[in-house]
Structure formats: C-alpha cells, structure tokens
Image (cartoon, rainbow, N blue to C red):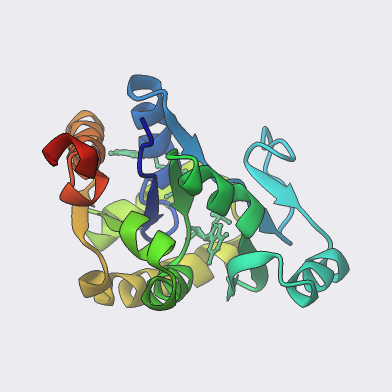
C-alpha cells in the first residue's frame, strides 16, 4: 500500500539543541531520515562530510545553485547553506519522512514552494525549537565550544529575530529540560504521522 511522505522542517536559533533533539528522536523512531544539507562553512571537530553536511567550496555551492539543484538555500552567519532536491523529493514521493534542520529563511522558502507544489504542500510540517530564555541559549552555545567569538556574537544576535517568526511554524517545542523536550518532539513526530493527509484514502472507500 502506498504511504504519503512527510517533509518535516525544524528551525530554531543556533545552539538551542536541534541536532541533539533530532538525534534523540531518530534513536526512538528509526524510520525518520535526515536531509544532509550543503554548506560552505568549515567542519567542526567530529563532523563528517556526507553525514553532518556536504562541505562545499563557495565555487561549488554557486555552481549547484546555478544548476538548480537546491530546494531552498540561504546565507546564514556569513556562510551559505542549502537543501538539495535530491535529498528530499524522491524520498517523500516514496512515502518516507524527511527531516530538514534549516533556518527561518529556508523554512519560508519551503512554505512558498508548497503553494505551487501539491507534493510539498501535502508533506510539509514546520516545527520551531525554542530556548527557555536567552541567557540559557547563550550559555549552551558557549559551552558547546565550537564557535569563534565573532561567530558566537552573530549567532546570539540572530536568535531573537528568528524567534520573532514563530507564527511560520505549526508546532513549538521548548527545549528546557532535555528529556521533556525530546519526548515532546517525539510526540509531534507521532502526531504528524496521524495527520489526515497521511491517511490512505482506500481505507475509507
Ligand atoms: P543546535 O543544533 O540547535 O545548534 P546543539 O544540538 O548542537 O544545537 O546543542 C547546543 C549545545 O547545547 C550542545 O552542547 C548540547 O549538548 C547542549 N544542549 C542541548 N539541549 C540542552 C538542554 N536541554 N539543556 C542543556 N544543554 C543542552
Ligand atoms: P550550523 O552552522 O550551526 O550547523 O547551522 C547554522 C544554521 O544554519 C542553523 O540555523 C541551521 O538550521 C541552518 N541550516 C543548516 N542547513 C541549512 C540549509 O540547508 N538551509 C538553510 N536555509 N539553513 C540551514
């Protein structure tokens, strides 16, 4: 029986815990698949090409934009980031659940794409991960110890602006206590699976 796919967009300020929460959810719901984005930023320690990101030069990124390979792309914190159509479209057509960890500009582009494309419209759901407060967010970002002072400032300054766009999202998960937030995110994923749009019509005819 054919299943409908889900395209699950997750956004939230840098350091809010998106990667941590998605990793937890994927351990519990192994059918979820993660869309690996392209970026021009340098890998952090432990980040592998093809797993965390496809790490591209600025030239290669620009060529891929030119060839129309991206579903969405944006400039974030002085680098370029983008979602490849090849990571997403075939999978949702096959009925898979694809997770995108992208910023608010990318989320807005997916909302626009959904207006013209019924496959995306049927599949897209938007989740915002929010911090309990700004000092906790800044503390997590510092503790992660992966950014230069300049990058830290860019990321903290951008956070309030990203949160102002909360109405773009269908669900909001506040990441205060990690276990509770992971449970909430898993509940949202389960609820998305139960959407009417995912129900097989032939069951009701
Ligand atoms: P993002 O992917 O949103 O940039 P990360 O998942 O890398 O964020 O999390 C940023 C840092 O905050 C990591 O060091 C992570 O271990 C930590 N962290 C995540 N969630 C919590 C939480 N609920 N409480 C405290 N620290 C957290
Ligand atoms: P980081 O450099 O911390 O991995 O990510 C920085 C920001 O870029 C995060 O907000 C993340 O969601 C966003 N991002 C990652 N991949 C993409 C992408 O493919 N497209 C867009 N628009 N944003 C992305």
Please identify the residue farthest to the right as the structure is shown.
59
Residue at point 25%, 45% (across, down) = 198
Please identify the residue farthest to the front as the structure is shown.
205
Q: Is residue 155 left or right of residue 90?
A: left
Q: Position of residue 126 (x, y in %)?
A: 30, 59
Q: Position of residue 77 (x, y in %)?
A: 58, 70
From the image, which quarter does the N terminus lie in?
Answer: top left
Q: Is residue 103 left or right of residue 170?
A: right
Residue at point 71%, 65% (across, down) = 69
Residue at point 37%, 77% (across, down) = 115
In the rendered view, tell whether residue 97 sits above or below residue 9: above
Residue 57 visible in the displayed image: yes
Q: Nearer the viewer, residue 43 or 125?
A: 125
From the image, which quarter does the C terminus lie in?
Answer: top left
Residue 124 visible in the displayed image: no
Q: How many circles with numbers are drawn on the protein? A: 0
Q: Nearer the viewer, residue 67 or 104?
A: 67
* Quarter assignment of residue 172: bottom left
Residue at point 79%, 77% (across, down) = 66
Q: Nearer the viewer, residue 77 or 56?
A: 56
Q: Position of residue 93 (x, y in %)?
A: 49, 47
Q: Is residue 166 left or right of residue 15?
A: left
In the rendered view, tell whether residue 6 sits above or below residue 24: below
Q: Position of residue 166 (x, y in %)?
A: 23, 70
């Amino acid at each position: 029986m054919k299943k409908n796919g889900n395209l699950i967009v997750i956004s939230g300020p840098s350091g809010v815990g998106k990667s941590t929460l998605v990793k937890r959810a994927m351990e519990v719901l192994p059918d979820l698949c993660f869309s690996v984005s392209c970026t021009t930023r340098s890998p952090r320690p432990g980040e592998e090409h093809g797993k965390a990101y496809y790490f591209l030069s600025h030239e290669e990124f620009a060529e891929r934009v030119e060839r129309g390979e991206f579903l969405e792309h944006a400039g974030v914190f002085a680098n370029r980031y983008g979602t490849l159509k090849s990571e997403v479209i075939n999978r949702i057509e096959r009925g898979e659940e694809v997770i995108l960890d992208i910023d608010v500009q990318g989320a807005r582009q997916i909302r626009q794409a959904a207006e013209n494309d019924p496959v995306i419209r049927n599949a897209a759901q938007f989740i915002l991960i929010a911090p309990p407060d700004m000092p906790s967010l800044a503390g997590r970002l510092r503790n992660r110890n992966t950014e230069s002072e300049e990058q830290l400032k860019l990321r903290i300054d951008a956070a309030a602006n990203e949160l102002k766009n909360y109405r773009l999202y269908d669900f909001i998960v506040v990441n205060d206590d990690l276990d509770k937030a992971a449970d909430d995110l898993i509940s949202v994923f389960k609820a998305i699976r139960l959407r009417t749009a995912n129900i097989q019509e032939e069951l009701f005819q």
